[in-house]
Image (cartoon, rainbow, N blue to C red):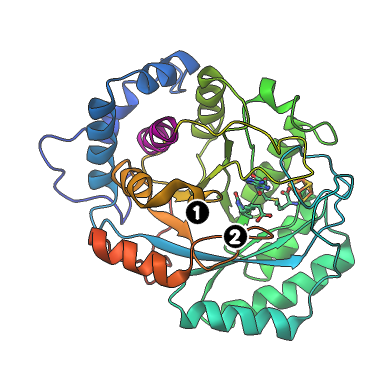
Amino acid sequence: MLDAQTVEKPLTHVKSEADLRKEVDASGQWTVAQIEALFALPFNELMLKAQETHQTYFPEGDVELATLLSIKTGGCPEDCGYCPQAARYDTDVKAEKLMGLEEVLEAAKAAKAAGSNRFCMGAAWREPKDRDIEKVTAMIKGVKALGLETCATLGMLEADQAQALSEAGLDFYNHNLDTSEDFYRSVISTRGYQDRLDTISNVRSAGMSVCCGGIVGMGESREQRAAFLARLANLSPYPESVPINHLVPVAGTPLADQKPLDPLEFVRTIAVARITMPKARVRLSAGRQELGRAVQAMCFMAGANSIFYGEQLLTTGNPEAEQDRALLAELGLKTKQSCKAEVLV
Ligand code: SAM
Ligand code: DTB
Ligand code: SF4
């Protein structure tokens, strides 16, 4: 089924969704080998294919701006090897209490005034307690009343918690698969891959849109990157928002000394995400400060159409809003004012 994002008369040189689907196997699933074959295309061919897909599904070519706020920082009991907020790693992040409602609403107002579309509240929890859910639902209602789209990322969710967030009006819930199932084991031990899939399923069943992606550049192989994208693309339906984070190596975490991924491989990852999840918002997430303007421009060509906007992610830095506005203006990219009409099938 086509949605509002799909052009009525597709350009004749671009592939229809039916054609794209012919690239998946008989069961309608992407195989890892098919995704590896996309990665292995000559660079220009891959970029053209991604750009064609992007133009078909997002004819407006606009970029969504999402602002993050860490509503509960640090002190997390989990052992995610990349994360500065895990209590067990000696990083500069200090544990703080859950923020108050007024402070959150002030930050949301500032994000809206700066032109943001979506406000995402992040908490360094393994999972929220029911009393946390009550406090966060008040935040969701307040942020929504400002006319912003709402997103939250609070760790694992039970079905009734997802339902409560949905009833409060939460539009998106972010919970990442982070990487392929086999590489996952070398990065995180305190929660399993299936736990993540269960949370995503609870979010879907509660009627919210899914924001789910991961991190590249943690030392995984190309095959593992392909397997990670296959898991995302084979979710039924695939996520509406796909944040692709480039690892930000943080001193004190196990991945502090990880060698950076080749920037062209990062661009390829974005292109493959666009081709395999044609209707999703593919978001350039953590690590943009290190990418520089030229690599970011290539990522937009490869089909990225969302960014985290504002000078802070959760605990690490992000480009200044003014710098991002200048880059988008220079590239002639419009920003998205509202994603409300954008309900995917
Ligand atoms: N505690 C919740 C959870 O784990 O779902 C929500 C917050 S957690 C910080 C959200 C995501 O941020 C992680 O799944 C990971 O993809 C990303 N992230 C955390 N630290 C990162 C880093 N150093 N570099 C890149 N991405 C990172
Ligand atoms: C996501 O995939 N990336 C964002 C958001 N979802 C919550 C978080 C990035 C965090 C980067 C490290 C930090 O700033 O603490
Ligand atoms: Fe905790 Fe989330 Fe960081 Fe993992 S990624 S340590 S769950 S805050």
What residue did someone put label 2 on?
317
The residue range painted magenta reads 263-276
Mark 2–mark 1 contact, CB under 8 Å? yes
x and y percentages locating residue 262 in the rendered image = 46, 30
Residue 345 shows in this picture: no
At 31% from the left and 62% from the top, the residue drawn is: 328
Identify the main secondary structure in magenta. helix
* 313 up-or-down from 198: above or below: below
From the viewer's side, name the closer residue of 73 and 274. 73
Percent x, y for residue 193?
A: 73, 31
Q: Please check the rendered image and state whether residue 268 is part of the magenta-colored stretch, yes or no.
A: yes
Q: Which residue is mark 1?
A: 289
Does ligand 2 reach within 8 Å of label 2's beta carbon?
yes
Left or right: 129, with 21 as reference point: right
Q: Residues within 10 Å of mark 2 (few under 14, many from 20)?
A: some
Q: Secondary structure at mark 1?
A: helix
Lower position in the chain sequence, tag 2 or tag 1: 1
Amino acid type, mark 1: Gln
What type is the residue that disc 2 sits on?
Gly
